[in-house]
Image: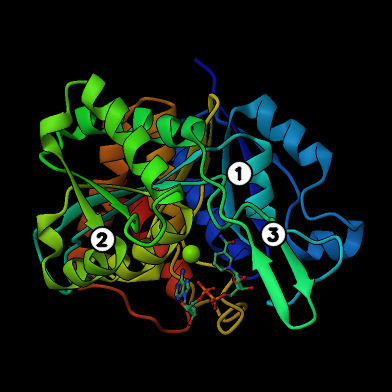
Amino acid sequence: MSYSLCVMAGDGIGREVVPPAVAVLEKLLPGLRVVEAEAGWECFQKRGVSVPEATLDRMRECGAGLFGAVSSPSRKVEGYRSAILSLRQQLGLNVNLRPVRSWPQVSPKPGIDLLILRENSEGLYSGREHWESDGVAIAERVISRAASSRLAECAVVVAQQRQARRITLVHKANVLPLTCGLFRDSCREVLQAAGLGERVDERLVDVAALQLVQQPEAFDLIVTSNLFGDILSDLACHWGGGLGLAPSLNWGGGLALAEPVHGSAPDIAGSGRANPLAAMLSAALLVRHHWKLPELAVRLESAVERFLQEEGGIDYGCETTRQIAQGVLQRL
Ligand code: NAI
Ligand code: MG
């Protein structure tokens, strides 16, 4: 079997954390074909587009990708759309898997092992924002039965893989009865048809946030819409040791794109202090869910676990990236 990987390092620390993640994949999969592609803010400034057609073609051709991070200005820039949002929408990467687990030495609490499944293509990130009049701006929240059902179909697969004891649908249907109601009902239908109905419960997003802080070990699989998943996964990753250890996988349409949850971190870019574990653990998700090699994913995660245990956690000094990269590679 031959494996191909489309690598989009992007901007800022994306360029620093991606090479260590590629190195562990090359060690796990000798002969891995690695193809580089452009995406991000610098790419936009150079080419006028944040994701060139050639990048989409390479990603489709490889089937699997690794994305670092990109910078996006917090103001409207004509013609610019965040590269990762474009990739998710244009490639039909409908689902985002965001696991959070306790790691030795770095987690504030042991015994946490939860997975947030976030809808990845619509919701408030539909890109439909406009001025209604002077001083009034509108963002449209798009929820469809089709995308919600696809998310729930993925939840069925993942629930079976991890033998989930509880599947929590997170929404705000008391305030948004049409959109959140459609989301909740579509997900419930799919989960019920798969025989998982008894394990499904629901939480309103505000109380879910509180409970993720109070009692994170009570959660197993969380299924939620785009914006809620974005926010809750940053909150929950505190329990896994923070953004430097938070992995994710964009998944759908037969394609998968591994992506650390963090951004381009301009405050530390170029200093050598970026933690590459989020990118490495994202690579492990690719190995497990896309290439379907769970034993290799476990090998990588065990190497990370031993590294953290034996080195006493992470030293965010001036050589963090290099030390962690070497430490994990040696234990692989
Ligand atoms: P950020 O995730 O880049 O950084 C937040 C904080 O966490 C910073 O203090 C940073 O130094 C720290 N941090 C993040 N990753 C780290 C790592 N691997 N090791 C050590 N420390 C780490 O989020 P921020 O600052 O809100 O956004 C910066 C830029 O990134 C913005 O332009 C934003 O649009 C973009 N962004 C891109 C994302 C993506 O490409 N998927 C996701 C989130 C933000
Ligand atoms: Mg985020």
**Classed neighbour count for the residue bearing mark 2: other residues with Cα under 10 Å, few (<14), some (14–19), many (≥20):** many
Q: Quadrant of residue 80?
A: bottom right
Mark 1 or mark 3, which has the lower sequence index?
3
Residue under the image location 34 percent in, 26 percent down = 293
Q: Position of residue 53 (x, y in %)?
A: 82, 39
Q: Position of residue 273 (x, y in %)?
A: 48, 78
Which residue in the protein does label 1 denote?
88
Q: Gap in Å between the C-alphas at discs 2 and 3?
A: 34 Å
Residue under the image location 63 percent in, 52 percent down = 126
Mark 2 or 3: the one toward you: 3
Q: Gap in Å between the C-alphas at discs 2 and 1?
A: 32 Å
Element carrying mark 1: helix
Q: Residue furthest right?
A: 47
**250 versus 159 height, above or below:** below
Q: Residue furthest top?
A: 1
Mark 2 or 1: the one toward you: 1
Q: Which mark is residue 82?
A: 3
Regarding residue 288, the answer to whether it shows in the image is no
Who is closer to the viewer here, 177 or 12?
177
Residue under the image location 16 percent in, 65 percent down = 104
Who is closer to the viewer here, 164 or 62?
164
Element carrying mark 3: loop
Q: Quadrant of residue 263?
A: bottom right
Confirm or deny contact between disc 1 and disc 3 (CB under 8 A).
Answer: no
Which amino acid type corresponds to the residue marked 1 in the rendered image? Arg
Kindly tell me whether mark 3's CB lies below 8 Å from ligand 1.
Answer: yes
Which amino acid type corresponds to the residue marked 3 in the rendered image? Ser
Kindly tell me whether mark 2's CB lies below 8 Å from ligand 1.
Answer: no
**197 versus 259 height, above or below:** above
Which residue in the protein does label 2 denote?
307
Q: Position of residue 127 (x, y in %)?
A: 68, 55
Confirm or deny contact between disc 2 and disc 3 (CB under 8 A).
Answer: no
